[in-house]
Amino acid sequence: MAAEVSRPSDVDVWSPDRSVRIVAGVDGQVRVQVQGLRRHTEDSLAGQVRAAVRLAWARVQQPAERGGSRGSRSGW
């Protein structure tokens, strides 16, 4: 599978434990990747998803002029 490169207007965020990755674009397209499901309960995974979604939502709403580069973020 080829690696995809995020456009500059996309956000690419990880949950605090890096088990959930969300790539969201201002055009409304969202991609979610989950890894390490076995280490989570339903509640703990839901918490990781909520944390990643909050970060992605905040970054999508930022004006392009603020924040400089909006590429990959290595962690929380």
Image (cartoon, grey):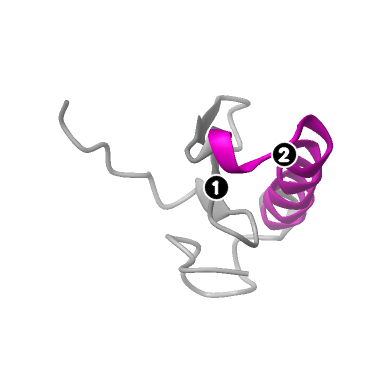
Q: Which residues are magenta?
A: 38-59
- Magenta portion: prevailing SS class: helix
Which residue is tagged 2? 45
Labels 2 and 1 touching (C-beta < 8 A): yes
Q: Nearer the viewer, residue 10 or 12?
A: 12
Which residue is tagged 1? 19
Q: Nearer the viewer, residue 32 or 4?
A: 32
**Up-down relation of residue 76 to residue 45 (above or below):** below
Image quarter where the C terminus lies is: bottom right
Image quarter where the N terminus lies is: top left
Where disc 2 sits, the SS reads helix
Does the magenta portion include 70?
no
**Image location (x, y in percent) of residue 40:** 67, 40
Q: CA distance from mark 2 to mark 1?
A: 8 Å
Q: Amino acid at mark 2?
A: Leu
Lateral position of residue 50 relative to residue 14, left or right: right
Q: What residue is at 49 percent from the left and 48 percent from the top?
A: 9
Q: What residue is at 56 percent from the left and 54 percent from the top?
A: 14
**Image location (x, y in percent) of residue 53:** 73, 44
Count of labels shown? Answer: 2
**Image location (x, y in percent) of residue 56:** 67, 49
**Does residue 9 show up?**
yes
Q: What residue is at 53 percent from the left and 55 percent from the top?
A: 18
